[in-house]
Image: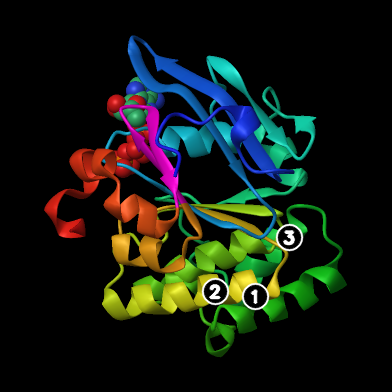
Amino acid sequence: MMTATPTFDTLVDNPVLAARGVTVDFDGVRALDGVSFSVSAHEILGLIGPNGAGKTTFMNVLSGFQRPTTGAVHVADRDVTSWSPERIARVGIGRTFQAVRPFPTLTVEQNIELGALGTGARRKVARERTDEILDALSLGHRRDAAAGALPHGEERRLGIARALASAPSVLLLDEPAAGTNESESDELVESLRAIKARFECALVIIEHDMRLIMGICQRIQVLDFGRTIAVGTPEEIRRDPAVLEAYLGMEAQ
Ligand SMILES: Nc1ncnc2c1ncn2[C@@H]1O[C@H](COP(=O)(O)OP(=O)(O)OP(=O)(O)O)[C@@H](O)[C@H]1O
């Protein structure tokens, strides 16, 4: 287990997405302080930490929505640190947002197809991909429903489906289980497993639902006050004293 802040060089070999020494300052607040990170093709990585630890800011840096004050972001061997979000999306980094909802008056199918067409897929390819995603995320029975009429758990899955439609090599998910009940969260886990099994896509998941994170992630990185305090398997993280002190508290013991 690595409990110190990892350096770029000691992280995974051949990462599809990596960041080195990322610092972000907001008017006197240091939201991130030298965070390094990498994810392998097809890996499921959890990014956890207490409120305000810097998780969303870090995801914004990875996807081009926040320019780091210092540090670098690489997609495979390309330095994308100064790229726009649109350009980063085009080289395979997809993401969902905590608060962005699907287009409510469009159908589920149309929402997903737009996600594919938006990154340049031809209509036939977009249709095929939409069918595959509807099936993998168990949304086929809702194909013609208006997105705005979906129950909350399905609406969250549609958000993921839309991001998946752009055929990302890495999908960044910002609190996909937010507001879901236990059975919706179980369905979400099934969908994430189906994505891993059926699509060539790594997943990076910010989530406060520890049952979900511990159940599905192969590796977890923990942030606290803008720094990495641990990286390891769920088992290692569950027992890490720094993590217990910072975040999990008694509930993890
Ligand atoms: N645009 C901003 N301007 C100023 N400060 C910001 C901005 N965005 C984030 N911060 C601050 O940066 C720190 C990290 O915030 P961030 O939202 O990244 O944390 P988080 O780990 O995602 O939290 P949560 O789990 O509550 O979503 C916090 O102190 C927050 O107040």
Q: Mark 1 points at which residue?
A: 197
Q: In the displayed structure, does residue 170 sit left or right of residue 159?
A: right
Q: Mark 2 points at which residue?
A: 193
Q: Mark 3 points at which residue?
A: 167
Query: Is the residue 119 above or below the residue 81 in the image?
Result: below
State the quadrant of the C terminus. Answer: bottom left
Q: What stretch is highlighted in magenta?
A: 220-232
Q: In the displayed structure, does residue 122 sit left or right of residue 41?
A: right
Image coordinates of residue 144 in percent, x first then y, are: 58, 84
Q: Which of marks 3 and 2 is nearer the N terminus?
A: 3
Quadrant of residue 32 within the rendered picture: top left
Residue depicted at x 68% and y 22%: 82
Q: Colour scheme used in the picture? A: rainbow
Quick check: is 206 in the magenta stretch? no
Quadrant of residue 169 within the rendered picture: bottom right
Image coordinates of residue 236 in percent, x first then y, are: 37, 53
Residue depicted at x 22% and y 38%: 246
Mark 3 crowd level (few <14, some 14–19, many ≥20, 10 Å Cα): many
Pair 1/3: label in front: 1
State the quadrant of the N terminus. Answer: top left
> Which quadrant of the figure shows ligand 1?
top left
Instruction: Give the residue type at disc 2.
Output: Arg
User: Is residue 201 visible in this depiction of the protein?
Assistant: yes
> Do callouts 2 and 1 mark residues in contact (Cβ within 8 Å)?
yes
